[in-house]
Image: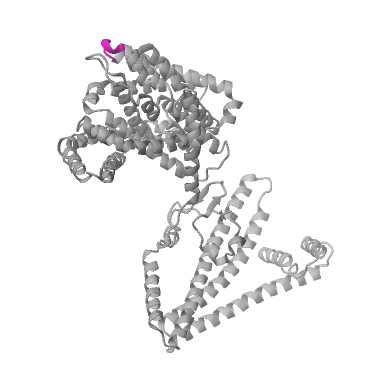
Amino acid sequence: MKATGFISLWTLVSLPCGPLANPAEREDVVKHAIKLHRGKGAVTTQRKQWVLGSCRKLSGLLRQKNIVLNKLKNAIRAVEKDAGLSDEEKLFQVHTFEIFQKELNESENSVFQAIHGLQRALQGDYKDVVNMKESSRQRLEALREAAIKEEMEYVELLAAEKHQVEALKNMQHQNKSLSMLDEILEDVRKAADRLEEEIEEHAFDDNKSVRGVNFEAVLRVEEDEANSKRNASKREVEDDLGLSMLIDSQNNQYILTKPRDSTIPRADHHFIKDIVTIGMLSLPCGWLCTTIGLPTMFGYIICGVLLGPSGLNSIKSIVQVETLGEFGVFFTLFLVGLEFSPERLRKVWKISLQGPCYMTVLMIAFGLLWGHLLQIRPTQSVFISTCLSLSSTPLVSRFLAGSVRGDKEGDIDYSSVLLGMLVMQDVQLGLFIAVMPTLIQAGVSTYSSIFKEILRILMLIGQILFSLAAVFLLCLVIKTYLIGPYYRKLHTESKGNKEILILGITAFTFLMLTITELLDVSMELGCFLAGALISSQGHMVTEEIMCCIEPIRDFLAIIFFASIGLHVFPTFVIYELTVLLFLTLSVVIMKFVLAVLVLSLILPKTSQYIKWIVSAGLAQVSEFSFVLGSRARRAGIISREVYLLVLSVTTLSLLLAPALWRAAIMKCVPRPERRSST
C-alpha cells in the first residue's frame, strides 16, 4: 500500500500538468494534488477513485510496453529467418530493434527509480545533512550512469543512421552501372572504413568498467568564433574537436589529447598562442631587467606573472606550458654536467654527499622543534622543512654561467662544490617524492603502526641507494666502453650537418633521463650525468656541443621561468607582505647559517673561504617546492593557507637570491673572477 501511495502521488503530479499551458492552471492543479494527498478538500471515495485511476494508467502503460516488446521479439525472429536479406542487413535491422527495446526498458527503470528516490527522501530526516548529502550523491551517480547509457545509445543510433545511408547508396549503385572513377572511389571508401576500424581505440568502452574510474559531468566549450560567420552546419561543429575544451564541476579544464579519428591532423592553437605570447612578452621584460641590473630570468618570471591567473589570465594551456618548461630544466642540467667533468666530481664527491644530507637533517630537526612549539603536526613539519631545505639548481646554474671555475692551485673550486651539492639535492628530491605516499599514510596512522611506517621508509631509502649504485656503475661502463665510439660516430656523420649531432646528443640525454626515472631516481640527475659523461671526451668536444645546445636551452629556460611566474600571486604577497617578508628572511638566514656551519665542518682548512659563496648559493628555496606543495595539498598533508605561504616564501627567496649572491661574490672572490661571475 505504501508503494501504491507513492505511485499515485507521482502520477498525480506528473500526468495532469502536461497539457496545461497556463501557469495559473498548473498552480491550481498542484494545490489540488497536495490537498488530495493530505486528505483535505476531498471525500474518501474521491481519493480512492483517484488512486485507482492513476494506478490503472500506469499499469496500462506497462502492459502496452510488454506488448510492444513481444512484437519486437517476433520482428527480430522474422528478420533472422528472412532469406532475402543479406547478413549485414539482418544485423542492422536486429540492432535497430534492440535499441528500441533498450529505450523502453530504460524508460520503465527511470520511473521506478524516481519513485524509489521519493520514498527514500520521505523516510529521511530533513535535519540530517549527512543523510541528505548521501542521498544527493546517490542521485548524482544515478544521473551520471543514465547520461552514459544515453550517450552510448545516441552513438549507436548515429552508427545505425550511417549504416542506413550506406545501404541506400549500395542499392543505388546496384541499380546503375558504375564508371571507372566511381569504382575507384568505392574501393577507396571501403579501404578507409577498414582503416578507421583498425586504428580506432575503444578507450571509452575499455575504461568505463576499470576500477577507480568515475563518471563526471563536464561542460564542452567550443571555439569562440561564431558559427554564423562560417555558416557551419551542426554536424560540422560536432566534428570540429580540435579546439574544444572540457570543464568539470571542480573547474578543472581539459583539452583534446588524442582524437578518435587519427587520420585528421589537429593542432592545439591555444598552446601555440600561449607560447607565442610568452616569447613576445619575454623580450621587453628581460630587456628591462638587464637595464636595471637584474638577471634576465626575473624578467621571464614577471612575464609569467603578467600573463598568468594573477594578471591578464591569457594563458589557457598552463599544464602544457609547464611541461614544455621542464625541458628547460633538463637541458640546463645537461649543460651544467657538460661543464662539470668527472675529475672535478671525484674531487668534491664527499663534500657533495655529506653537505646536503647534514643540512636536510638539521632543517628537519629545527622544523620539528618549531612545529612542537607551534603545535603543528609532525608530518606537516617534516614536509615543510624538507621543501625549504632544497635549493634551485637552474637559478644557481645561471649564476655560475660563464664564470671562471679555477682558483688557487690545490684548492677546491666553489662552483664544483656548489653544483655537486645541488645535484645531490636533486637526488634527495627524487627520494622525497618516493617517500611521500608513506608520509601521507603516516599522517593518518595510529601510533601502533608507526614502527611499520619507519621500516617502510628505511626500505625505500635502501632501494634509492641501490638505484644510485646501479646508475653510477652504468655510468662507469658507458664512460669506459661506449661514449667514445658513440661520439666519434656522431662527429663523423654530422660533418656539414649539425642535425645528427644535436639529435644524437639529445637522444643520449633522454636515454640517461629514462634510465634514472626507471630506477626511481631524479630525472634531473640523468641529464646531469649525461653532460658529465660527454665532457669526459675533452674540452674541444665540450665546446662544440655547447655551441649547438645552448640556444635550445636558452629558449626552453625562458618557458620554464615564465611557468614559475604563473604561480606567483602578487595580490596575496601584498596583503601579507609583513608576514611573508619575516618568514622569507628567517628561512634565508637559517639556510645560510646552517650551510656555513656544515661547510665549516667538512671543508678543508685551505678552502674555508668558499663557504660564504656556497652558502649564499644555497640560501634560496627550490622552485620544485611548487610541485611538492601541490602534491601535498592534494594529499591533505598541508592546508591551502600553508601551500600559499610556501609558494610565496619560495618566490621571495628566489628574488632575494641575486642580491645575496652578489654580496658574497664581492666579499670573497678576487676582482678578475668577480667580473665574470656576476
Outermost right residue: 41
Write down the quadrant of residue 108 in the picture. bottom right
Q: Residue at x 84, y 63 (%)?
A: 41
Instruction: Establish if 448 lies above or below 45.
Output: above
From the viewer's side, name the closer residue of 666 and 127.
Answer: 666
From the top left corner, tell me how far across and down residue 154 is, in percent. 53, 68
From the top left corner, tell me how far across and down residue 403 is, in percent. 33, 22
Q: Is any part of residue 460 visible from this angle?
A: no
**Residues rendered magenta in the picture:** 603-608
Instruction: Establish if 210 lies above or below 275.
Output: below
> Is residue 643 within the magenta segment?
no
From the top left corner, tell me how far across and down residue 433 is, in percent. 38, 35
Outermost left residue: 481
Q: Residue at x 39, y 31 (%)?
A: 450
Main SS of the magenta part reads helix
Horizontally, is 497 left or right of 372 in the view?
left
Horizontally, is 336 left or right of 280 in the view?
left
Quadrant occupied by the N terminus = bottom right
Quadrant occupied by the C terminus = top left
Outermost top residue: 605
Q: Residue at x 21, y 35 (%)?
A: 475
